[in-house]
Amino acid sequence: MKYQNMVKATFIERPNRFIAYCDVAGEAIKVHVKNTGRCKELLKPGSMVYLEKAINPNRKTPYSLIAVEKGDLLINMDSQVPNAVVEEALKSGMITLPNLEGPITKIKREQTYGQSRFDFYGEAGIEKFFIEVKGCTLEEHGVVRFPDAPTERGVKHLEELIGAKEAGYKAYVIFVVQMEKALYFTPHKERHPAFAETLKKAAQSGVEVLAYTCKVTPESLEIVAPLEVRL
């Protein structure tokens, strides 16, 4: 995944989920935040951030906030990009889905099943599968956690994946860790116990739980390596 026209700036404040103010070349500019999560551990006054300049010169927010420096980590916090990097990794072979008997022959975004819309539907020969993708930006002492806020929608997706598995589909949930270094991934039990419990139940039901770290630059995001999952 590539970005264009990137600018380095200093984070000032975030008055609501959708906008922030950043210092761009000495001027306070209102920018679009491409992540509605809390991100309080990332967006601190004085933090170095990277903004993508909008193509439309008439847009109310001339930049979108893409990435932030946290210590020696560069973290991509664009919540709209994990699906794109998963699709790229599936097509390149960087992600190999376990327990498929043959190569993937079809991959399609946004497929309704039951009461949910999964991120991907795919086929590998006669086998059919669903994939749900979650982006992760919350890091604590090298441990990556999800979610950073309660997500009833996330619980619903996991329950639907369990149902799909029971109906004969292969089912996967992929956590895209939007940073390069991490010790392992684990659900955030303190933030949302129900999500952690349902994720464990999903794994016990045969849903494959996968996590991958990414190479992050101000201009790009790319899946590079599998990460240990601890439930």
Image (cartoon, grey):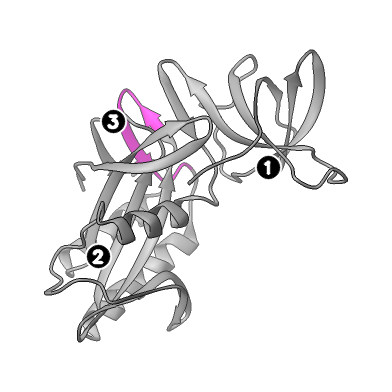
Residue found at x 46% / y 41%? 148
Local packing at callout 3 (Cα closer than 10 Å; few below 14, some 14-19, many 20+) is some
Q: Amino acid at mark 1?
A: Arg
| Proximity of marks 2 and 1: CB atoms separated by less than 8 Å | no
Mark closest to the chain's N terminus, 2 or 1? 1
Give the Cα distance between marks 3 and 2: 23 Å
Q: Point out the stretch of residues depicted in magenta.
A: 139-148
Expressed as whole percent of the image width and height from the top left, the position of residue 153 reads: 49, 63
Q: Quadrant of residue 190?
A: top left
Expressed as whole percent of the image width and height from the top left, the position of residue 37 reads: 56, 43
Residue 145 on the magenta segment: yes
Instruction: Determine which of the numbered discs, if any, sits on residue 194 in the image.
Output: none
| Proximity of marks 3 and 2: CB atoms separated by less than 8 Å | no
Q: Amino acid at mark 2?
A: Ala
Q: Is residue 111 above or below residue 148?
A: below
Q: Secondary structure at mark 2?
A: helix
Which residue is more in the foreground, 129 or 230?
Answer: 129
Q: Is residue 128 above or below residue 195?
A: below
Which residue is more in the foreground, 107 or 166?
Answer: 107
Mark closest to the chain's N terminus, 3 or 2? 3
Residue found at x 55% / y 43%? 78
Give the Cα distance between marks 1 and 3: 26 Å
In the rendered structure, the answer to whether residue 165 lies left or right of residue 34 reads: left
Frontmost of labels 1 and 3 is 3
Q: Is residue 20 above or below residue 167?
A: above
Per the picture, the main secondary structure of the magenta-coloured stretch is strand
Expressed as whole percent of the image width and height from the top left, the position of residue 206 reads: 17, 69
Q: Which residue is mark 3?
A: 182
Instruction: Determine which of the numbered discs, if any, sits on residue 202 in the image.
Output: 2
Q: Secondary structure at mark 3?
A: loop
